Image (cartoon, rainbow, N blue to C red):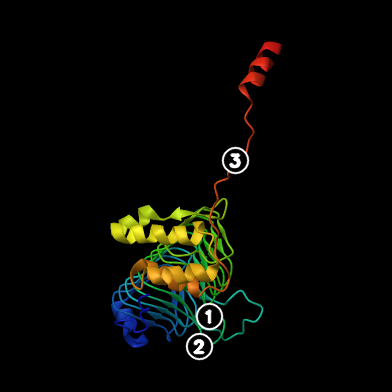
Amino acid sequence: MGTPALRARGILTSERKKLTANIHPTAVVSVRAELGIDVTVGPFCVIEEGVQVGEGCRLASHVVLKRNTVLGAENRIEDGAVLGGRPQHLQAADRTGNLIVGDGNQIREMVTIHAGLHEGESTQVGNQNMIMVAAHIGHDACVEDHTILTNNVLLGGHTHVGHHAYLAGASAAHQFCRIGCHAMVGGQAAIKRDVPPYVMMDGQSNEVVGLNLVGLRRQGFSNEDISQLKAAYRVIYRSELAWKEVLSHLRTQSTTGPVHVLTEFLSSGERGFVQARRTPNAPTLRLMEPAKSSAVRKAG
């Protein structure tokens, strides 16, 4: 994950920010907030004390940046988004942690992202992410780079989303769950366990239904990498080996590349993993025998 831009490039003091930032007259900007060069602040925005906004950021209307929120450069925040709010937690004190957002993110209308639960702790969003309408990221979560969170995605506290992951509409992740890199999660999924990297999770059954092959090819994975991942997938979900044997087999299969990333993810799991869909051995509906079918038609 790229480190979010703590530096907030081009930050200016309150005495100079109005000379170099385009601030709408209805916006409320604390004198203790710091804005970078070429920042646009739209109508009725509120920027509280301790906020840092990096150069080139664009805030539409009614955007709220709560205290100690740090934005990197070139972020675009659309109408009604609230960033850095107090965690929805019974133990949340008046002084909470902060929110750190990297560079080049698109944060769409009505998105909410909460700050870390305790002072000194952070919710983190990396670089070049697309976070769509009404998505929510809970306290102390970490969203890496180049992810897509579509409309109404819900991430509980302490969740972790790996780079290039895709979460479809209205999918929800239980607190402390991990979604691996390059994973694709279907709409309305209920994520209660970790989703391994590179897989596709169906949103109706909440089961893994194979590798995210289209996404992997779009990201330039080689045929060799994909073949190795297919072999690893068969070991994990089809071999019926004991779990220790699965991990041992994967470690001997590859010490570098995507299989190594997958193995490290599986080795560090604490919540268990989403299971794969199994094809039934027999038809789920009993078929009518031809002789009985003819007899029924004659009787009719």
- Please report the residue visible at 36 percent of the width from the left and 52 percent of the height from the top: 214
Q: What's the distance in space between the residues labelled 1 and 2, CA to CA?
A: 8 Å
Q: Residue 297 placed where, x, y %?
A: 66, 14
Which amino acid, by three-letter code, is at mark 1? Gly
Per the image, label 1 sits on a secondary structure element best described as loop
Per the image, label 3 sits on a secondary structure element best described as loop
Which amino acid, by three-letter code, is at mark 3? Ala
Q: Which mark is residue 116?
A: 1
Q: Which residue is mark 2?
A: 120
Q: Which mark is residue 282?
A: 3
The residue lying toward the viewer, choosing from 73 and 273, is 273
Q: Residues within 10 Å of mark 2 (few under 14, many from 20)?
A: few
Above or below, 273 relative to 35: above
Mark 3 or mark 2, whichever is nearer to me: 3
Question: Badges 1 and 2: C-beta atoms under 8 Å apart?
Answer: yes
Query: From the viewer's perspective, is 224 left or right of 192?
Result: left
Above or below, 242 relative to 2: above
Specify which label sits upstream in the sequence, 3 or 2: 2
Q: What's the distance in space between the residues labelled 3 and 1, CA to CA?
A: 50 Å
Q: Quadrant of the C terminus?
A: top right
